[in-house]
Amino acid sequence: MKPLTYLAFDYGTRITGVAVGRYPPGRAEGAGTVAGLASGPDWRAIEKLLTTWQPDILVVGLPLNMDGTDNEMTVAARRFGRRLDGRYHLPVYWADERLTTASARERVEATGVPRGRRKAALDTLAAITILQAYFDDLPSASLDHPRGPTHE
């Protein structure tokens, strides 16, 4: 079985956190951040990440309300995912990211990251948390995906 490379995004209008990992073994690590531009995502920076990591699959965090309903950022993240699909023609999967930012914030504060570097660390750690949770939900015995790419 050939491991697949995943690139995950914690989409934000100002900063998007990015994580990378291979499955198997299913371990996510940080790949940095991408700054947002007035015109939208910095597609050049995203393209550079795709060139560097050569992912097979993209994962976008879906920021749902606690009751599972959409909010303004849900709509923006879905648009971002559709644009990734349209530009790069790679499978895009969605991952529920409820509570990932809160969890990442606690971890960043606990590690003593200097204040000026907390936002980038927070966004990267949120992307890592999203991808790791996605990996943890995949069946360990196979590379089959229990859910197909979502094009909404």
Image: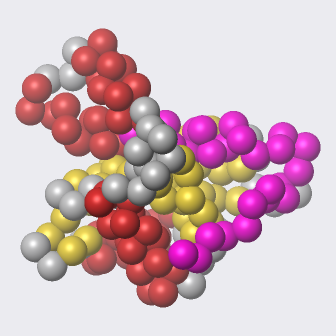
150 sits to left or right of 29: right
Range of magenta residues? 126-152
Does 43 lie within the magenta span? no
Q: How many marks?
A: 0
Rendered image coloring scheme: secondary structure
Task: Note whether residue 115 is visible.
Answer: yes
Q: Quadrant of residue 39?
A: bottom left
Which sits in the foreground, 78 or 123?
A: 78
Residue at the (43%, 33%) spot, across then down? 99
Q: Residue 70, percent across and down?
A: 42, 56
Q: Residue 54, percent across and down?
A: 55, 69
Q: Is residue 117 depicted above or below 76 in this figure?
A: above
103 sits to left or right of 111: right
Q: Residue 121, percent across and down?
A: 27, 36
Which sits in the foreground, 100 or 140?
A: 100
Does 133 lie within the magenta span? yes
Q: Quadrant of the N terminus?
A: bottom right
Task: Note whether residue 127 is visible.
Answer: no
Q: Residue 2, percent across and down?
A: 81, 60
Which sits in the foreground, 133 or 121?
A: 133
Residue at the (30%, 26%) spot, across then down? 105
Q: Quadrant of the C terminus?
A: bottom right
Q: Is residue 63 depicted above or below 140 in this figure?
A: below
Residue at the (73%, 67%) spot, across then down? 148
121 sits to left or right of 69: left
Q: Quadrant of residue 127?
A: top left
Residue at the (46%, 52%) spot, across then down? 69
